[in-house]
Amino acid sequence: MKTYAARRASLIAQMQAKGGGIAIIPTAPEVMRNRDADYPYRHDSYFYYLSGFTEPEAVIVLLAGEKNLSILFCREKNLEREIWDGFRYGPEAARSTFGFDAAYPIEAIDTELPKLMANAQGLFYALGSDSKLDAQMQRWLQTVRSQARAGVTPPSAAYDVQVLLDEMRLHKDAGEIDIMQRSADIAAAAHRRAMRIARPGLREYHLEAEILHEFRNNGSQFPAYGSIVATGANACVLHYRASDAELKDGDLVLIDAGCELDSYASDITRAFPVNGKFSGPQKELYEIVLASQYAAIAETRPGKRFMDGHDAAVKVLAQGMLDTGLLDKNKVGSLSDVLENRAYSQFYMHRTGHWLGMDVHDVGEYRDAAPNGAEKPWRTLQAGMVLTVEPGIYVRPAEGVPEQYWNIGIRIEDDALVTADGCHILSVAAPKTVADIEALMKHD
């Protein structure tokens, strides 16, 4: 638990640099699915990042001032409720186990918070992220303000605590990288499993079931997001969800699936032929997407801008679209014209990556600060950042588009850790060359 204590200390140091004060970070609420059934509980990422504590109904309070303190509010020990809902630490055990200076029952928060807020210089809190806590915050502030004649003052400055935490979370430490590597390994194994079992006549949900089996069988607690299993024309729907179509001979199937392991996500996409053999047109487009991904990966290293990889991928994709006739040179012009006018967006309409970590679309600014209102430049990559690299081509039927490419949807997505001298692909165990995919899928 030393890692979490060190993170709390780092946040307190940042608070002190801004004059000190009090930080309040709640975990996520439990959410009812329907009638007497809850959704599976998942703690808030910011809260977990600072605590390692996974129970609901909990709040972290940090004090930065003459005396620095980390305090946890959590549920009381309750043996009767444990019969129904499982183990609870209770305040005292949670305090000692997770390294807090003090802990209180969550029921005491309305009494204790105004005391802790009194005379604090700044309030570090993510206003608007929790409406229930926002209302409580107003009551606590009113309680503090009501003591003005006794010389008590409320915080005089407000800061978004998530902004400070975002920068911390953007740079992964060795422990986080180890978990993310294991998460990627599990997800890669799930993609290999889906490739091995795929054949005409199955349905998308059969492959999804195999993926979920591999996740849980290897210790992943959850899928990192709703898995996308899209065959044929469905692969041209970026966030396809139905998962009930039949896999047909001659079609591709696109799978975008990652798991969550110990609160860290993986995010992998592969596209492969249902029958195990790429057709000529499928192979043409696949090789273009793969080449564009290699170009983006080459730009994923310290000192490069976040969008450099996207720009490199788009250039390769656009040239491929011209070469195959997806884009008619007589109508769209040269490669420079295609890039300037974004004509490629008919077949490629999303960015080539995003931050990855505790959330699949993880926190962190994508642009660096700029002085005097100037346009912010894209973020400079640094060692320890993790991002996805995921170019694609999606060909919907349209006038002027060669029919042999209709309804082909391809995305190739990997998880890249920026290292001191380049990047390391965490998801390398998921096959992605035509030869490797066909070899894996070869049925005796």
Image: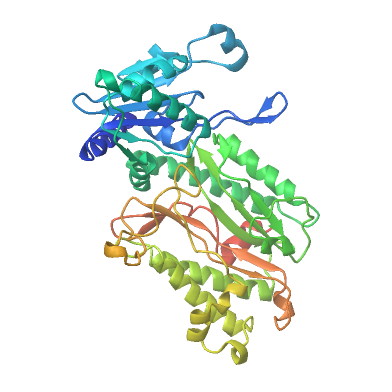
Q: Nearer the viewer, residue 299 or 367?
A: 367
Report x, y in % for residue 256: 60, 53
Colour pattern of the rendering: rainbow
Q: Residue placed farthest to the bottom in the image? A: 330
- Residue 443 in sight: no
Instruction: Reply above or below: 440 against 116.
Output: below
Residue 85: x and y, percent? 59, 17
Image location of residue 92, percent across then percent down: 38, 12
- Please state, as top left, top right, bottom left or bottom right, where the N terminus lies in the image: top left
Q: Nearer the viewer, residue 73 or 89?
A: 73
Figure label count: 0
Name which quarter of the figure residue 235 lies in: bottom right
- Please identify the quarter of the rendering in which residue 420 is found: bottom left
Side of 119 where 224 appears, left or right: right
- Most extreme residue toward the top is 80
Front residue of 375/13: it is 375
Question: Hey, which residue is sitting farthest left in the picture?
Answer: 66
Q: Residue at x 57, y 68 (%)?
A: 349
To which quarter of the image does residue 142 belong? Answer: top left
Horizontal arrangement in the rendering, residue 436 relative to residue 229 (left or right): left
Q: Residue at x 32, y 22 (%)?
A: 116
| Of the pair 20 and 186, the residue shown nearer to us | 20
Instruction: Give the side of residue 106 with respect to residue 164, left or right.
Output: right
Q: Position of residue 359 (x, y in %)?
A: 48, 44
Quarter occupied by the C terminus = bottom right
Identified at 43% across, 40% down, the residue is 179
* Residue 52 visible to the viewer: yes
